[in-house]
Image (spheres, rainbow, N blue to C red):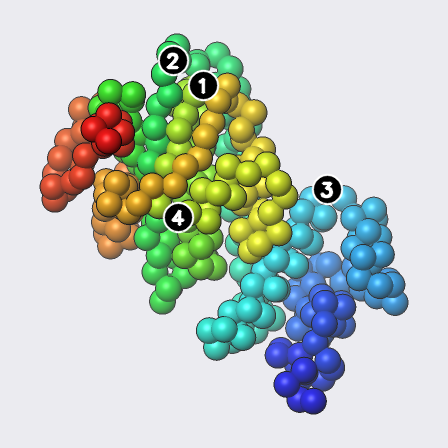
Amino acid sequence: MTEDRCLKCGQETEDSNHVFQRCPIAKEVCGQLNYSWVFNNINLDLWSWLTWVFREGTTEQCRGFCYGLWILWTSRNKFLYEGKISTSRDISKQIKSYILEMEGIRERELTLVTNTKTNQRLQRENTTIFFDAAFDSQHNRSAIGLVVKEQDGKIVAAKSILHENVASPFAAEAYAGYQATMLGIQLGYLNVDILGDSKIVTSKCQSENRDRSEIGAIISDIQGLKCFFQKIRFSFIPRTRNIEAHRIARETLKKGEELYLEGENSRALCEEQEPTCLGYSEQRERR
C-alpha cells in the first residue's frame, strides 16, 4: 500500500530501520556531516546497530549522532503533520547549528561551575525564577523571558535570550526552562522554584526519568544541572500569573534585542510594562 511508503523517498515501507538506516535522505545527511561510517553495519537490526555505533564512535561522534537522529525524526514529523519539506542539506545544516549551540552551552557551563563554587549567595528561602517563550513559526526562532523574584516578591533580575533554528514552540519552552536553570546557577542560588506556563515542559523538567520526546536532549541537560542546587523544583503556573516573563519574551522577539538587568533596573523594566498580575509570592499568600 502506497500510504505505508516512506514519506521522504517513497521507495520502501516506512519503519524505524528505514527512516534511520536505509532512507537515501538519512544517508545524504550523514554523508554531509562526515558520518557515513555509521552505515558500515546496516545489516544489523536497529537496536544492535545503535549499540554498535555507540561502541565504535567517540563521545563527540555519539553526541552528534543522537542530535542527528532526533532532528531526522523531527523533520519527518514536520512533513507529516505540517507539510514542511526539508532537504538533506536543510537537515544537515540544522544539525550543525544545534551541535554548535549545545557545545557553546557546555563551555558556558564549565565557566559557571568554576564561578559558582566560589561565589554562592547565602540564602534562607527559595528564590523564584519565572520563564516563558515566544515563538516565530515563520523564521523558526524564539525569544525567552526570565524574571527572578526573591521570597518577598521583589524582582531582582530580568533577562531575555534569542534562539535561532528552534524546531517548535514545545522546544522553545524547553529552552526557556534550561535558561532559567542556568540563570539560577549564574546568580549563585542554592534553592530555587522555577515556574513556567507549559504544563508538559515543567512536568518533564521536574521528572528524573529519561525523556524520549523531541525535547529529550534539552530535558537531559536540565536534569544534569540539578546537582548545582541544594533544592530545585519546577512547577506549572497559569499564563495569567506569568505575565512579566511572557511580555519580556514577546517584546524581545519583536525587537530582536536581548537584555539583562539586575536590581532597580529590572524592577523598572517590569513596571514599564502594562499593568501585570500580582507576583507569585503575593498570590500564594492571598489564596
**Residue under pointer 2:** 123
Q: Looking at the image, is mark 3 or mark 1 earlier in the sequence?
A: 3
Q: CA distance from mark 1 to mark 4?
A: 24 Å
- Rendered residue at 58%/60% (across/down): 71
- Rendered residue at 53%/74% (across/down): 79
Residue type at the position of mark 4: Ser
Q: CA distance from mark 4 to mark 2?
A: 28 Å
Check if mark 4's residue and mark 2's residue have beta carbons within 8 Å: no
* Front of the two marks 3 and 1: 1
Helix, strand or loop at mark 1: loop
* Closest to the observer, 80 or 60: 80
Q: Where is 19 relative to 177, above or below?
A: below
- Crowd tier of the residue under label 1, counting other residues whose Cα lies within 10 Å: few below 14, some 14–19, many 20 or above: many
Q: Where does residue 11 sit, x and y in percent of width and height?
A: 71, 84
- Rendered residue at 56%/63% (across/down): 74
Residue type at the position of mark 1: Leu
**Residue under pointer 3:** 59
Q: Where does residue 22 sit, x and y in percent of width and height?
A: 76, 72
* Front of the two marks 1 and 4: 4
Q: Is residue 140 left or right of residue 248?
A: right
Q: CA distance from mark 2 to mark 3?
A: 37 Å
* Closest to the observer, 33 or 75: 75
Q: Locate the C terminus and report the quarter of the image it occupies.
A: top left
**Residue under pointer 1:** 190
